[in-house]
Amino acid sequence: MDFDLTDEQKAIRELARRFADEEIAPSAKERDEKEIFPDEILKKMGPLGFLGGPIPKEYGGAGLDYIAHAILTEEVGRACSSVRTTLSVHISLAQLTILKWGSEAQKKHWLPRLASGEILGCFGLTEPDTGSDAANQKTTALKKGDRWILNGAKMWISNAGKAELAIIFAQTDKSKGAKGLAAFLVERNTPGYSTRDIHGKLGMRSSNTGEIILEDCAVPAANLLGEVGQGFKVAMSGLDHGRYSVAAGSVGLIQACREASVAYAKERVQFGKPIAGFQLVQEMIARMRVSEDAARLLVYQAGHLKNRGRPDTIATCIAKYFSTEAAQQAAMDAIQVHGGYGYSNEYPVERYLRDARVATLYEGTSQIQQLIIGRHETGISAFV
Ligand SMILES: Cc1cc2nc3c(=O)[nH]c(=O)nc-3n(C[C@H](O)[C@H](O)[C@H](O)COP(=O)(O)OP(=O)(O)OC[C@H]3O[C@@H](n4cnc5c(N)ncnc54)[C@H](O)[C@@H]3O)c2cc1C
């Protein structure tokens, strides 16, 4: 086992860290306060290859291996979880799903535009009445001639208001249940397709979240992604990548919590000495460091499997479950280290907590990750 990063992975870490420190972190507070989407940051990320990291070069991506992809995601997550969420959806849920399931024509048409940042992508699985039970899609797709007519609504979709391309999951035949599902590539300008932004989120306030409304939205038959009946598999394979990205971003968030806490604890003096010298403060900092290392190793373990094309669903669920829960704990501890100051936006740790909170919910809640891991261990599904 080799724990050393390759030269390319080290170079990505350095490049991404510099970019994140100079271009992402400085505006994070204001973007969070005013719910400003990071358009300008994304424009700068495109030419650096940051918007299509793991996409092969032949489709316009940077051709990064999955560990390097995680490193880039960590660094972005360390600076701003909202930008990281935007990337997780655009790269991992949208592009990697097209890479796996798209026809050659679909890949050639969409991936270069997505990977360069010319357009953004999103992933429409969740509906107003369908969350964890993702197979139970209410959105319908009816074949009429050479078109599929989509009707329904998608809820809580990251990038919805900004994406030019959405992967939409829909039911083609209710009697078939999960085996009737299909995935479609739907362009924003398709008649019958509209979006509505959701405001007032607890965190991730600089990311865009919205509803997608589909009213007799006629999609060309050529935009079917995979085959009819494969929709659930398409969705789950997308989540294998999305969860990996969320886990990596959470590692970055834990690191941000640790770094902020160490810096503050060394400066803050109580009882005549820096609070960093108190054992109970060091306990919290040690917990952050241990969870950061453990989370990172779990992410890289899943990345190692991805690099070799081996099944990674369970390793990814373990990494996502652990990292996102650990990030929440780290953010709680970081506020504790900062005392009353941690409770105000004078310091970034209150944003870290608000941002960390959603990661145990989206891309499958912690309960859903536990059920997937539990099913793997026992051979018994607790879902039905
Ligand atoms: C900011 C944000 C961005 C998002 N981005 C996207 C996106 O880009 N694309 C997309 O498709 N979705 C997105 N989502 C939706 C997200 O994936 C869902 O919110 C999530 O899957 C949970 O679904 P739900 O909210 O309907 O909760 P529910 O499924 O209603 O769950 C509610 C509670 O019940 C628990 N629960 C449910 N079933 C079980 C069970 N069998 N056993 C034990 N407990 C259970 C859950 O763990 C949870 O605690 C986003 C959500 C948010 C908040």
Image: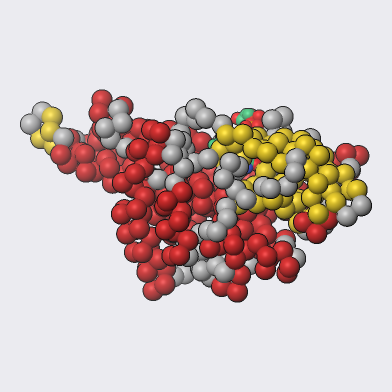
Q: Which residue corresponds to the image point at 77% horizontal and 37% vertical from the top-left? A: 215
Q: Which residue corresponds to the image point at 58% horizontal and 59% vertical from the top-left? A: 114
Quadrant of res 194: top right
Q: Which residue corresponds to the image point at 27% horizontal and 40% vertical from the top-left? A: 261
Q: Which residue corresponds to the image point at 84% horizontal and 48% vertical from the top-left? A: 148
231 relative position to 66: left or right:
right
Residue 314's x, y, as percent? 62, 52
| Scheme of colours in the image | secondary structure
- State the residue lying farthest toward the left: 272
Residue 268's x, y, as percent? 16, 35
205 relative position to 268: left or right:
right
Tell which of 143 and 231 is nearer to you: 143
The quarter of the image that holds ligand 1 is top right
2 relative position to 99: left or right:
left
Tell which of 6 and 103 is nearer to you: 103
Labels in figure, total: 0
345 relative position to 277: left or right:
right
Specify whether residue 235 is in view. Answer: no
Specify whether residue 338 is in view. Answer: yes
Residue 182's x, y, as percent? 80, 49
Tell which of 260 and 19 is nearer to you: 19
Q: Say if 150 sits above or below 304 in the image.
A: above
Residue 67's x, y, as percent? 48, 63
Q: Quadrant of the C terminus?
A: top right
